[in-house]
Image (tube, rainbow, N blue to C red):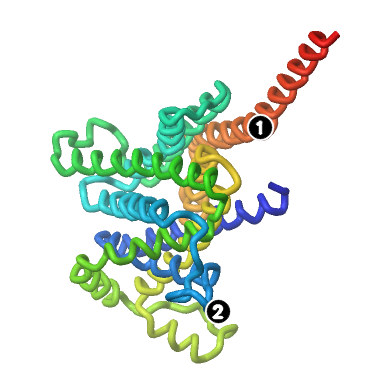
Amino acid sequence: MSGIESLGIVSLIFGGCCSNVYALEAILKREPDSGLLITLMQFIFSALSAYPSQFDASRPMFIKKPSVPMHRWVMGAAMFFAVNMLNNWAFAFNISVPVHIILRSFGSVTTMGAGWLVGKKYSQLQIVSVVILTLGVIVSAWADALSKGKSMDASEIDIHDKSFEMGLVVLLIAQLLSSYMGIYVQDTYAMYGKHWAENLFYEHLLSLPLFIPLVPTLRAQFDRLAQSPPLLVPSAISSALPPSLTRMLKSMPQSVFYLFMNSFTQLICISGVNLLGAKSSAVTVTVVLNIRKLVSFAFSIWLFGNHLTGLMVVGATLVFGAGALYGWETSVGLKRRARKGNQNGAAKEAKKGQ
């Protein structure tokens, strides 16, 4: 990837994903049991936004013929739907947000493990950097929880609570399935080309029918969000907007606005993730997303005035240091050793020919 292209992808991921987390927290503060509705809105926005890239007026339903066999997209969509549903479902159990983040921070490790199971190989330096990065995210999450007055003492977690145990199982299944999905998508790109826009369209479109049995629950969740107070629009923003748009925003319930904001920023986020996945390995994607989690913590400190503790500094150092180490090994170290190996092989062949 060129420098400008890399910067654009990183901007989509970090800008979209961090804004998405902010909107998500705003919704969950009002109505914690809104995960299903949030997931549906994200899927609708993403499918609609990706549709123009697949438009073909001469084809049935105006969708061009896919470049990848449909059975690959159907399988990927099923896994994508399951992962998103499981991650949101975990909030319904006795799982706190800090514990949720910590458990999900093992993505790079499980992705690397899934890759190893299907025959992929990683250098020792890549393995070490991913382990250090994961430890850094855990330390950062721990520090963030402590700075917000949330105890992470294991003695205060009721491990005998059946709800807590079920929540752990749900997150574990989601993490393992997400890791396999990353490898599956990477293999699809390797076999049929890196059609990331097509993947984005079908993984969301094919998931939508799965929400039909859940319509009553979705309607109840939306009704609760619609009961929130009207949105407060700062005068500096309202003066720059058309009067009709200002009136619409002021009449919109706060939680409904954050629901749309969450869906829009999620679209930006996953567009960046899909672009990155089409141009790099699954482990690289999870490493970048783990670093993004740390940036979300930093924004939380800045926006909400939380104290930057020494433990947070340690976590930041581990994450950014490990991310830089992994990036150097992937883009420089492995290629340098490969060139050296090729040169040594050529020298040996030359000696044999003499």
Q: Amino acid at mark 1?
A: Trp
Residue for point 77% across, 20% down: 343
Q: Position of residue 25 (x, y in %)?
A: 38, 59
Is residue 278 left or right of 306 when viewed as pictured? right
Which image quarter is the C terminus in? top right
Residue for point 39% across, 40% down: 180
The relative height of residue 97 versus residue 48 in the rendered view (above or below) is: above
Which of the 4 image quadrants contains residue 154?
Answer: top left
Looking at the image, the residue that sits furthest to the right is: 354
Q: Which mark is residue 104?
A: none
Question: Dot 2 corresponds to which residue?
Answer: 237
Looking at the image, the residue that sits furthest to the front is: 353
Q: Is residue 146 visible?
A: no
Q: Secondary structure at mark 1?
A: helix
Q: Amino acid at mark 2?
A: Ile
Count of labels shown?
Answer: 2
123 vs 196, nearest the viewer: 196
Q: Secondary structure at mark 2?
A: helix
Q: Position of residue 199 (x, y in %)?
A: 48, 57
Q: Which mark is residue 328?
A: 1
Residue for point 42% across, 43% down: 144
Crowding near the residue tagged with mark 1, few <14, some 14–19, many ≥20 C-alpha atoms within 10 Å: some
Looking at the image, the residue that sits furthest to the bottom is: 244
Residue for point 71% across, 19% down: 341
**Cα–Cα gap, marks 1 and 2:** 43 Å
Q: Is residue 351 visible?
A: yes
